[in-house]
Image (spheres, rainbow, N blue to C red):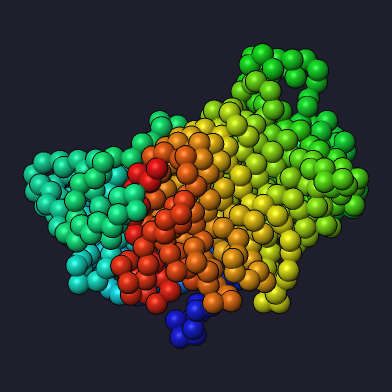
Amino acid sequence: MPFSGTSDPSGEHTDNFYKSIQHLNIAIEPEGNAGVFAIHWAVAQATSIRDVSINATGAKGGLFCENGGGGFIGDLSIVGGETGMMIGGQQWTLRNLSISGSTSSCVDLLWNWGFAFLASTFSNCPTGISFKGDAVTSLAVVDSFFVDVETGISTDWPETARGVVLDRVSATRVPIVATGLPGSASGTTFIRAWRQSYGFQGTVPVQPFAGQAMLPPFRPDEAQPNRGRPTLDGMGLPVNAVADAGCKADGKADDTPCLQAALNGSSAERSARAEGAAGTRFVFLPHGTYRITAPLAVPAGTTLVGEVLSIIAVDGSAPAFQGKGGSVTAALVVGEGAGPPVMLADLTITTLSDAPGAQLVRWAASQGSAVFDVHFRLYYAAFGQWHFLPGSSAYVENSWGWTADHNVDSGAELQVQVQNGWLVQGSNVSLYGTAVEHNIAYNYNFSGASDVVTAMMQTETPYWQQPQSAWGLTVEGGTERLTSYASGFYSWFFGGQHAVARLLPGSTDVNLFCHNVVGSAMLLEAGSRAVSNATSAAQKTFSSFLAADINAVT
């Protein structure tokens, strides 16, 4: 994204979707480039940086983002520079960063609402993360390392109301782990769980201004945030291209039969996969638009990978998706039946016309299944986006469930009616770098789910919907052990609403760290109780913004 240094790029990020930088090595020539950053990255949702290495020695830094509404950054290495990464934006999820050798700070946070750093290493800088000023709000650092830095996280607490959460953080030769949290100049300090924030235990406010240890939240082994998207050349699988099965990918031909044939393989392959003996079938979708008119089954043991966000387009004129008599039909049925895990990557799921009976994805995949860079882009009606069935499991990284409120290439507002966002009823579900927006009833709904970990959930209510608008977050009865590291639930129009997030009775061990809301009078509605108001937990970003940690709500 070209930037002259004199023009004002603010605002451009809100329309800068569907961008990715992958598999690059970048080196800045030190001579005459003292003010240069390797990457200027002012982007919004459905964007990613993956597997990029930057040598910024002698330069200003590796990555600069003065504004953004993203997004996901992972597997990024930065060496040198005055500042490794200078970044600001509403919400970001950053996994497996390695930033070292900067002369000022590894990371300088300019402004934010909610950031989550996962499985990252900050080393050989005076400051690991600089988190200061009225414009920064909340920060979660999980499964990460500070090595040979003077201060791990530098804050200006309590002069300004910050929210910092550390979970499973190791600091080696770090005298100050965080402002208010001493470390060791010669040894290693392990921080199991610690926070410095406004907060609530249940619905009772607690205010640990100087920081305090806290009860560690539950997190299953499956949720470790260092999995990452595998490279296809490292999978050692034969490629089955759908073009070989006759798919046109022109958005006009019915590609349902050819897609299903490519996914199924031979009868012998299907039998072997069902028995868990055949490993994975790798199906590749070259870039294009694949129109489907009937449910498409993605069998257990399938790896389905697109190219530059290949589009699977549901034709609502097909009888299966018209919803006559209130019927609901899944467009993609993923991983049904016992069998090996499923992987989906680099796909866009959309509608070609109103499909009021279409549940776009029904997910039944087994533990170990994963989704990378798969997005919903909906310009026409549907019943729901994603349903994680009871007993299913998933690791989801960088997924945007967007019911469109405007055209991608213009600001013209749209009124698209999709009833439901993501209904999560599975177990061992990890959602890293996700956003679900503009659905009528709810965006995220956890109902009877267990062992769930999220890092940066983001929602917006429908722009056309008056209060009480859609729920950004609902946690229903029977949900157990849900831990959220950073979230942002936004209600922009019609004067806001009473609450945009709620916990219904019967859920246990729910922990919401760095929980942020906009345009809502309350942080959370817990049964008949309201948690917080603007006077007890408001940040200084603007008057309708609330942020806090909410622990062990039952």
116 shown above or below 368:
below
Residue at 64% across / 56% down in the picture? 441
Would you say residue 496 is visible in this rendering?
yes
256 shown above or below 422:
above
- Residue 502 in picture, x, y percent from top left: 49, 54
131 to the left or right of 54: left
In front: 343, or 547? 547
255 to the left or right of 399: right
- Residue 199 in picture, x, y percent from top left: 29, 57
Q: Say how many tags the image has.
A: 0
Residue at 43% across / 64% down in the picture? 522
Residue at 40% across / 42% down in the picture? 554
272 shown above or below 302:
above
In front: 454, or 118? 454
Hey, which quadrant is residue 480 in on the image? top left
- Residue 328 in picture, x, y percent from top left: 79, 43
- Residue 316 in picture, x, y percent from top left: 85, 52
Residue at 23% across / 59% down in the picture? 207
In front: 140, or 197? 197
Would you say residue 455 is visible in this rendering?
no
Q: Residue furthest bottom?
A: 6
Hey, which quadrant is residue 285 in on the image? top right
Hey, which quadrant is residue 82 in on the image? bottom left
In front: 365, or 438? 438
521 to the left or right of 321: left
| Quadrant (top left, top right, bottom left, bottom right) of the N terminus | bottom right
